[in-house]
Amino acid sequence: MARTDNGRRVTFRHDEIRDWHDNVRLDYGYAMTIASAQGLTVDRAFLLADDRPARETIYPAATRHREALDVYVNRAPLAFDIAEHWSEDEADMPVTDSDVRAYLAERWSRSVPKEAALDYVSGGMWRDAREGAQLRAQHRRSGTEETRQDTAGDHAAANDNFRERIAQDIRHAVNGWRHGASVDAFAAERGEVMAAWDDLRARVRDEGDAVALSPAFRETLDRHGALMKQAASFTARPRVFERLLSERAGIGDGELQELRAVHARAGRYLRSVTARSAHARQNTEAASEQARRDAERAPRPGREAGRASLRPRRRSRAGRAHRRLRREQGACRRDARASRGDRR
């Protein structure tokens, strides 16, 4: 819940003020000048202006937003200025919003470029603007068109030379700062990566090859790979970075070769551990599959006990039938002997 300046309370849900990155899109707002807002980008901008800004000033103020721009003006002084320039016939007419917008469009469209010191440079010397005006007046009085053209050409050439030299110095300074910053970042990252490798080596001695399959090892290897790409860019431009690497970071060809060797050893170690792990996994899967097949082939204990208990019953039934048959046969023989005795 939020409370506005006029006492009104506004409620909203958390998902309404969060973006895709789970950041809250509600914060304190601060007013700043147009000059300090250059380079700033916001979703919605609010501009408070009058008729003083020119095109060079109003353009950065009106291009800071992504979604919407609200412009606020004090209408009373603008209406007074507009009515002051009207004729007597229009003096009694009210100033409308369209008149205010047209007046601001005309005022904000004018160009008022800033003057620089280079505008007064001529012939390799700094020259006062009043002196240049006096020279132009003398040329006009003399009426020599060629002299005027030569003077203007000299002024333009001198200004162009100064501008080119200053621009070149600025480029050298900016490039030196940018290259120095990249070298410092490279040296700091190199120190962190080498320290991480030392920690991983200590872990390998205690924990074994399982460390090579951990996320920390892969993250360090990825960071080392990014360092190798940056080192390749430095090596491709030795005239620019060789001196900077040596003076600012104390890194020479030996340190770069060591960096390449460590990266190569780490890659070979990871590949060998991965291969051994895959081979061990295959052996484990094969052993488990063989054990499963043996378990399926082996007879169940309950079924064997049942079969063993049935066999004595089957044998006893057969014995009883055999004994019954023998008794019947004996009875038949006895009857046959008895019948023969009767006949005698």
Image (tube, grey):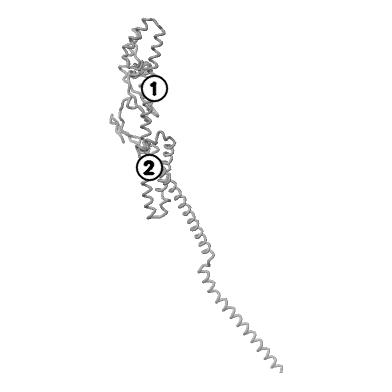
Q: Where is residue 125 in the image (x, y as percent from the top left)?
A: 33, 17
* Residue lying at the far right of the rendered structure: 343
Q: Where is residue 122 in the image (x, y as percent from the top left)?
A: 35, 15
Helix, strand or loop at disc 1? helix
Q: Which residue is identified by label 2?
A: 190
* Residue lying at the far bottom of the rendered structure: 344
Q: How far apart are marks 2 and 1 (CA)?
A: 38 Å
Against 179, residue 254 (above or below) is below
Q: What residue type is labelled 2?
A: Arg
Figure quadrant of residue 318: bottom right
Q: Position of residue 2 (x, y in %)?
A: 30, 34
Against 114, residue 309 (above or below) is below
Q: Is residue 100 visible?
A: no
- Quarter in which the C terminus is drawn: bottom right
Mark 2 or mark 1, earlier in chain: 1
Q: Where is residue 288 in the image (x, y as percent from the top left)?
A: 49, 60
Instruction: Please tell me which residue lies in front, 330 or 219.
Output: 219
Instruction: Please tell me which residue lies in front, 336 or 251.
Output: 251
Q: How crowded is mark 1: few (under 14 residues within 10 Å), some or many (20 or more)?
A: few
Question: Residue 164, which numbered label?
Answer: 1
Q: Is residue 26 visible?
A: yes
Q: Which amino acid does label 1 sit on?
A: Glu
Instruction: Please tell me which residue lies in front, 48 or 261.
Output: 261
Figure quadrant of residue 54: top left
